[in-house]
Image (cartoon, coloured by chain):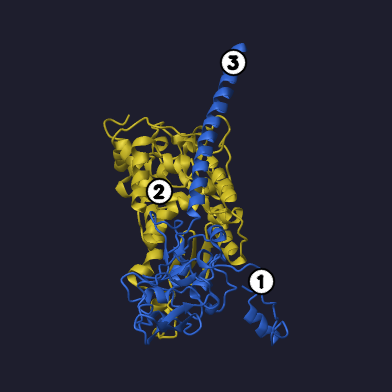
Chain colours: A blue, B yellow
C-alpha cells in the first residue's frame, strides 16, 4: 500500500517536473519571439508599404501575408518580404527606386486585400499617403545646380500640385534662374515616381515615411499673411506707431 | 517470423510495391498538386479564362487565376476564398477586427478539417511534412537513435505562447518565423533564405531529435489537431485480431501513441477507431501492415466486437 502511494507520488512528481520544464522552455521561447516581433515592427525608411496600408503597428496585426495584393499589382511593383530581408517576413512592400507605384485608378491591390490591412476606404489613389517625397540632397540635384533637369517634376502624376518648380535667382551666374523642385505634402502620395526617375546615380529625391520628415507648427502659431487672407484684410487697423526710442540725452 | 527481410521488404513482398506505398503516394500527389495549383498560373501562364471560357480571350477579359495567394489566404478561380484560421486567430488576438469576407474563408477551412480530421492539413497539405518524413526514414535507415527529447505537449505550449505574444506585441507573431508558411510562400513568391530553414528542420529531425518538428513542436499542427477532436474521417484498426505484433505500424507512425489504444484495447473494451486528434490520417500504418489491420473509415460504430 505504502509502496503504491510512493510510486504514485513519484509519478506525480515526474509529471509536475516535466510540465515545468516544457512550460519554462516555451516561455523562454515566447520571450525571444516577443522581442523579435517588436524588432520586426520597425520598418526601414526606404521601404514603402502599398497604398492604403494601415499605420505600421496596426498593419502588423492585420496583414496575414497572403500576397493577394502582390498578385493583383499589374506593374510588379509590390513584393513580399523574404527571409533575411529587413521587413517583417512575408509582408508586402516596394522600393521606389526599383519599381514605383503607378497609381492605378482602380486600386487593385487595395481591392485584393482580404483583411483590411490595406484600407478599402481608400477609393481615390490621389488620396493615398504611402510616404512623402523629399529632395534630400540639394548639393547634387541638377536643378539646384542651375540646370533644367526637371525630371522629377515632369514624371510626377500630380505635376504642379505635388511638385512645383519655384524660380530662384542663380547667384553663381548672376543672370540665370534656378527652378527649384518643391514637394507639397498636401498632394504628394508617395508613389515614388520622382525617386525612380531621378537621373543621378543615386537619387537626390527620395520617398520617406511622412512622420520622419514632416515638421509641425505649434498649435498656437498663426501666419500673419494667411490670417489676413482669411479675414479679407489686416487684422489690425492702421499702422501702429511705436514710440521711437532715442538715446536719452540726444548724444 | 520474418527471416532476414526488413519490414518494408516483407511488406512489399506481401502486397507489391505499389500497394505498400499507396497512401504515401497519394499524399505526395495531394501535397504537390495543391502547391502546383498555386504555381500553374505564375509559372506556366495558364489562366482559367484561357482554357475554359468558350470564346477567345480579348482585352476586356481579366485573366482569372486558378489559385491566387498562399496557404494563409487564397482565392480560387476568383470565387472561393480560403483562409488559415490559425493565422486569422492571431490577427484577431493581435487587435485587428476581422471582416466578414475573410471569416467566410476561415469557416470553410474549419468545416473542411472538422470533417476530414484537422491534421490532414499536416500530412496531406503541408510541404514541411515531406521534409520531416524523409528525415524520419533516413534516421531509421542510418540507425540514428537518442538525441534531445521533447514532450509531445510542447506544441500546445508553443501554440498558447504564440497567441500570448500576438496579444502582447500586437503582431501576427508566429508568422514572423513560421517555417510552414515561409517555405510555402517562398516557393510561390520567392524563397530568400527559406531554404536554410528547410535544411535546418531536416537536420534537426535527422540528427537532433526524432520527429521533433511535426510531432512535438509545430503549433500549426497543434492548432489543427484541436479541430481533429470531432473529425468524421478516422483510421480504424478494424482487423486488430489479425495483428501479429510486428510493431511496424508503431515504428513508422509519426504519432505512435495514438495507435496503441485502438490496436490493443480489445481487452480493455476500447473500440478499434483511432480517436486521438494527433493522428494525422497519413495512412502509413495501412501501407506498412502486412495483415491489413488498418483502414480508413468513420469515427462512428466504434464498438468492441464480442
Front position in the image: B42 or A128: A128
Q: Secondary structure at mark 2?
A: helix
The reply to whether label 3 and label 2 mark residues of one chain is no
Mark 3 vs 2: CB contact within 8 A: no
Q: Which residue position holds label 3?
A: A6
Disc nearer the start of the sequence (3/1)? 3
Q: Which residue position holds label 2?
A: B129
Front position in the image: A24 or B250: A24
| Subunit that carries the residue with mark 3 | A
* Looking at the image, residue B277 lies above or below residue A250: above
| Position in image of residue A212 (x %, y %) | 51, 64
* Looking at the image, residue B89 lies above or below residue A170: above
Which numbered circle lies on residue A190?
none
Residue drawn at (35%, 53%) of the image: B193
Find residue A168 and report its image quarter: bottom left
Of marks 3 and 1, the one in the foreground: 1
* Looking at the image, residue B94 lies above or below residue A188: above
Mark 2 vs 1: CB contact within 8 A: no
The reply to whether label 2 and label 1 mark residues of one chain is no
| Subunit that carries the residue with mark 2 | B
Which numbered circle lies on residue A249?
1
Q: Secondary structure at mark 1?
A: loop
Rounded to the nearest whole Å, what is the CA distance between mark 3 and mark 2?
A: 42 Å
The reply to whether label 3 and label 1 mark residues of one chain is yes
Residue drawn at (57%, 74%) of the image: A122
* Looking at the image, residue B209 lies above or below residue B184: above
Amino acid at each position: 500500500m505504502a509502496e503504491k502511494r510512493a510510486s504514485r507520488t513519484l509519478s506525480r512528481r515526474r509529471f509536475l517536473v516535466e510540465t515545468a520544464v516544457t512550460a519554462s522552455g516555451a516561455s523562454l521561447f515566447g520571450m525571444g519571439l516577443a522581442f523579435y516581433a517588436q524588432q520586426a515592427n520597425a520598418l526601414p525608411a526606404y521601404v514603402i508599404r502599398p497604398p492604403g496600408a494601415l499605420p505600421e503597428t496596426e498593419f502588423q496585426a492585420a496583414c496575414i501575408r497572403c500576397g493577394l495584393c502582390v498578385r493583383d499589382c499589374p506593374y510588379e511593383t509590390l513584393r513580399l518580404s523574404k527571409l533575411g530581408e529587413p521587413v517583417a517576413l512575408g509582408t508586402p512592400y516596394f522600393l521606389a527606386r526599383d519599381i514605383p507605384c503607378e497609381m492605378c485608378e482602380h486600386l487593385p491591390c487595395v481591392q485584393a486585400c482580404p483583411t483590411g490591412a490595406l484600407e478599402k476606404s481608400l477609393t481615390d489613389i490621389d488620396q493615398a499617403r504611402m510616404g512623402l517625397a523629399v529632395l534630400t540632397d540639394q548639393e547634387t540635384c541638377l536643378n539646384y545646380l542651375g540646370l533644367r533637369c526637371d525630371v522629377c517634376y515632369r514624371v510626377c502624376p500630380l505635376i504642379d500640385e505635388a511638385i512645383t518648380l519655384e524660380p530662384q535667382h542663380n547667384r553663381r551666374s548672376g543672370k540665370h534662374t534656378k527652378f527649384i523642385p518643391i514637394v507639397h505634402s498636401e498632394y504628394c502620395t508617395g508613389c515614388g515616381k520622382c525617386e525612380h526617375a531621378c537621373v543621378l546615380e543615386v537619387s537626390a529625391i527620395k520617398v520617406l515615411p511622412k512622420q520622419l520628415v514632416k515638421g509641425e507648427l505649434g498649435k498656437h502659431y498663426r501666419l500673419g499673411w494667411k490670417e489676413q487672407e482669411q479675414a479679407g484684410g489686416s487684422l489690425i487697423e492702421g499702422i501702429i506707431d511705436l514710440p521711437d526710442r532715442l538715446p536719452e540725452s540726444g548724444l | 517470423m520474418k527471416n532476414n527481410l526488413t519490414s518494408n521488404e516483407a511488406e512489399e513482398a506481401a502486397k507489391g510495391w505499389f500497394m505498400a506505398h499507396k497512401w504515401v503516394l497519394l499524399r505526395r500527389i495531394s501535397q504537390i498538386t495543391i502547391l502546383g495549383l498555386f504555381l500553374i498560373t505564375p509559372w506556366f501562364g495558364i489562366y482559367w479564362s484561357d482554357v475554359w471560357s468558350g470564346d477567345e480571350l480579348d482585352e476586356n477579359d481579366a485573366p482569372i487565376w486558378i489559385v491566387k495567394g498562399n496557404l494563409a489566404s487564397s482565392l480560387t478561380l476568383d470565387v472561393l476564398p480560403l483562409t488559415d484560421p490559425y493565422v486569422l486567430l492571431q490577427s484577431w488576438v493581435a487587435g485587428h477586427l476581422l471582416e466578414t469576407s475573410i471569416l467566410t474563408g476561415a469557416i470553410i477551412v474549419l468545416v473542411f478539417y472538422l470533417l476530414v480530421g484537422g491534421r490532414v492539413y499536416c500530412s496531406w497539405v503541408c510541404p514541411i511534412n515531406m521534409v520531416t518524413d524523409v528525415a524520419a526514414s533516413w534516421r531509421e535507415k542510418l540507425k540514428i537513435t537518442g538525441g534531445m527529447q521533447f514532450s509531445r505537449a510542447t506544441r500546445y505550449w508553443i501554440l498558447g505562447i504564440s497567441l500570448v505574444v500576438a496579444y502582447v506585441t500586437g503582431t501576427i507573431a508566429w508568422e514572423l518565423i513560421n517555417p510552414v508558411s515561409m517555405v510555402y510562400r517562398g516557393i510561390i513568391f520567392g524563397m530568400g533564405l527559406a531554404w536554410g530553414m528547410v535544411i535546418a528542420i531536416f537536420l534537426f529531425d535527422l540528427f537532433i531529435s526524432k520527429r521533433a518538428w511535426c510531432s512535438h513542436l509545430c503549433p500549426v499542427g497543434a492548432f489543427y489537431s484541436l479541430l481533429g477532436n470531432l473529425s468524421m474521417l478516422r483510421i480504424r484498426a478494424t482487423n486488430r485480431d489479425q495483428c501479429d505484433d510486428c510493431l511496424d505500424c508503431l515504428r513508422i507512425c509519426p504519432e505512435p501513441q495514438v495507435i496503441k489504444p485502438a490496436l490493443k484495447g480489445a481487452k480493455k473494451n476500447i473500440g478499434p477507431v483511432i480517436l486521438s486528434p494527433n493522428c494525422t490520417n497519413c495512412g502509413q500504418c495501412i501501407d506498412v501492415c502486412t495483415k491489413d489491420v488498418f483502414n480508413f473509415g468513420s469515427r462512428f460504430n466504434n464498438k468492441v466486437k464480442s
